[in-house]
Amino acid sequence: MKDLQIKKLIDAEKKRQKSVINLIASENYCSADSLEALGSVFDNKYAEGYPGARYYGGNQVVDQLELLAQERAIKLFGLDKGEHVEKFSDKNPHKSKWHVNVQPWSGANANLAVYLGLAPIGSKIMGMALTSGGHLSHAQKVSITGKVWEPVTYIVDPETEVLDYDYVEELAKSEKPAIIVAGFTAYPREVDWKRFRKIADEAGALLMVDMSHLAGLIAGKAYPSPFPYADVVTTTTHKTLRGPRGAMIFSRIDSRELYKKIDKAVFPGLQGGPHESQIAGIAVALKEATDAKFKSYAKQVIKNAKVLASELQKRGWHVVADGTDSHMVLVDTWMNGEKVSEIAARSIKHGEMALGAGGIPGKVAELELEKAGIICNKNTVPGEKRSPFDPSGIRLGTPAETTRGKKEADFKKIAEKIDKVLKGIKI
Ligand SMILES: Cc1ncc(COP(=O)(O)O)c(C=O)c1O
């Protein structure tokens, strides 16, 4: 590369990534092949529209690429066999019973496109509160999704910190949202997709599952699939799925023609030209995820997270929802049982708060861990009493380090290190 300033920054970031333990639950390392596709000549091409119906010439190769990416996505999640289908569309090039749009630039855009396509402006969208693990794009007030549509917000049970489906059902039946969103950004336990289907049916709502965090685990058959139950499934491609940054929207092909409305919402509704190089990188990752090795990877991600959770619990930390069924462990560092006073004393050293007020704020925990070479993010916890900028906990994830080959014994050591760092014990 001739631009030495940028080259220097790339090298510095490469070095940083290699030198840390990466526990950011939403990050991963996509393959060299995916990165090669991402940096390919496909980036030079404008391709507004969809395969066979573009607004620019010269898209013969791009059409093949996009169709291949769609075919791989449909196959990876077992949708070429299809279930619960009313009508089979002849127009679908792959004869699948689900359609997939591979053009959304990122996860938030994908969710916005679904609402734009399927929920009348001003209608209700029901999503999980940020503090319980929902994402900003699930109709939170600070996001456009919560300004253009009316948010209906559900929370987890404050005692158990897991979903209370009876309460969600009551709320849905009384509010009658156009769309119910399930699938979260900080919820570690298994989600009962079937129950969400029943809730949506009783409320007369569409069920949208945002499986962004879980896509790789679902593809690897390590976590239950939402496809038999959802009307629409959105996902990012860069978390557990281990592709480059991007997103996809799956929708059923039936008489409601949801997929046509979603396609129109993505383009021309929200986006211009698709990033075809990104689609090429995603297509590579989708093929990689069909490999048997990816199944073992997905299972290992969960095994590692379970070890991380239980080792932290053994050391007195409050693990939200009492553990994990996924790749994610949420730790309430502010309220952590027996070690509170010891940790509070340490917080004072950081000038954060008065003794006895609680444990470690998530922000301090994130900073302290980073100094010790462990990267994670501060996170709100159920019933958050602090603020999203200075929340009570941290979110830890195992996908990135599992990609680097770490197993249960390694995560036991990582838990020990986290414990020592947060308690101020010399390592
Ligand atoms: C559940 C969920 N949906 C959507 C998104 C948004 O994805 P992006 O950052 O690609 O817009 C995220 C990001 O973390 C997420 O966790």
Image (spheres, helix red, strand yellow):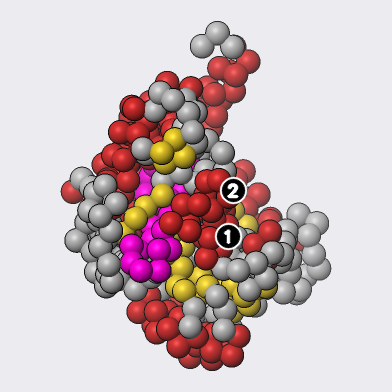
What's the residue at 42%, 79% (across, down)?
196
Three-letter amino acid code of the residue under disc 2 = Leu
Q: Is residue 353 something one can see in this rendering?
A: yes
Q: Residues within 10 Å of mark 1 (few under 14, many from 20)?
A: many
Tell me, for residue 204, which label it has, or none. Answer: none
What's the residue at 38%, 75% (across, down)?
193
Q: Position of residue 267 (x, y in %)?
A: 52, 46
What's the residue at 59%, 12% (across, down)?
3
Q: Is residue 427 something one can see in this rendering?
A: no
Find out whether residue 267 is within the magenta segment: no
What's the residue at 25%, 55% (across, down)?
90
Residue 131 sits above or below residue 203 on the image? above
Bounds of the magenta span?
A: 237-259
Tell me, for residue 116, which label it has, or none. Answer: 1
The residue closer to the viewer here, 36 or 353, is 36
Q: Residues within 10 Å of mark 2 (few under 14, many from 20)?
A: some
The mark that comes first in sequence, 1 or 2, is 1
CB atoms of marks 1 and 2 within 8 Å: yes
Which SS type dominates the magenta stretch?
loop
Tell me, for residue 270, which label it has, or none. Answer: 2
Label 1 element class: helix
Q: Position of residue 135 (x, y in %)?
A: 58, 62
Q: Quadrant of residue 383?
A: bottom right
Label 2 element class: helix
